[in-house]
Image (spheres, grey):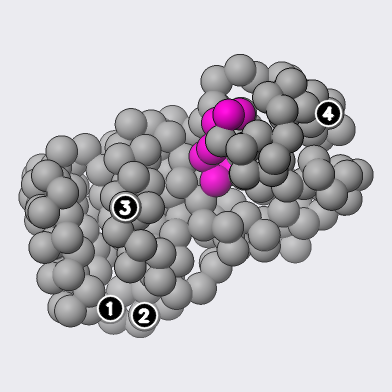
Amino acid sequence: MRVVIAEDNVLLSSGLELLLQSKGFEIAAIATDAPGFLAAVAAHRPDVTIVDVRLPPGFRDEGVRAALQARRDHPGLPILVLSQYVEQSYARRLLADTRGGIGYLLKDRVSRVAEFTEALRRVADGGTAMDPEVIAQLLTGDPVDALTPREREVLALMAEGHDNATIAKRLFITDNAVHKHIGNVFLKLGLPTETTGHRRVLATLTYLRHHASP
């Protein structure tokens, strides 16, 4: 599985390279700025990309803007965003594009090796990998206020990319209860009930993008 990384911090990019290579990933290129990232994606057509939100020269939003541009240039390109902070507006814009895998993790998640590599593989396969802190900040707004506390817990775990069985195990409830809560979530949010994991997550987060924006 070929990976293109956009990260200007040499220590972090080198660490990512060694970590991912040890887990069987092929690092096609490491870019330190947005133009270099876009060029690397065009040249290597990676299976998945890892992008820091803030890149030179301004260290504001160059990385995530490059990710959005790469997605426009290569529809369906799997993107895993890494950040020290939750950039809500850009997170919502990325999640609104349902044409491929997407992830948004905070950088401290990288230290949890098994969790991080599993998330990267899930994104490469077209799924979703969301940091719980990102989810907590996105799940705001009137539609979500209508959910019960348990329904909010189920929605948050769905958004992280977990299937029904995992949700049931984490919340210590039955599979039937999870199914019922998911049905209630979609009903209250005005969304059609879906049975495919990451599609329903993306649909939910797309809805939140349009209804929970500041």
Residue at image mark 4:
184
Q: Distance of mark 3 from mark 1, alpha carbons? A: 30 Å
**Residue identified by numbered label 1:** 56
Query: In the rendered view, would you say 93 is above or below 7?
Result: above
* Residues in magenta, as a range: 159-165
Q: CA distance from mark 4 to mark 3?
A: 32 Å
Q: Separation of disc 4 and disc 1 at Cα?
A: 45 Å
Q: Nearer the viewer, mark 4 or mark 1?
A: 4
Say which label, 4 or 2, has the lower sequence index: 2
Residue 35: mark in rendering: none
Mark 3 vs mark 1: in front: 3
Residue at (47% x, 40% y) in the render: 128
Helix, strand or loop status at disc 1:
loop
Residue assigned mark 2: 59
- Is residue 96 in the magenta section? no
Question: Is 84 left or right of 38, judged from the image as shown?
Answer: right
Residue positioned 75% across, 63% down in the render: 214
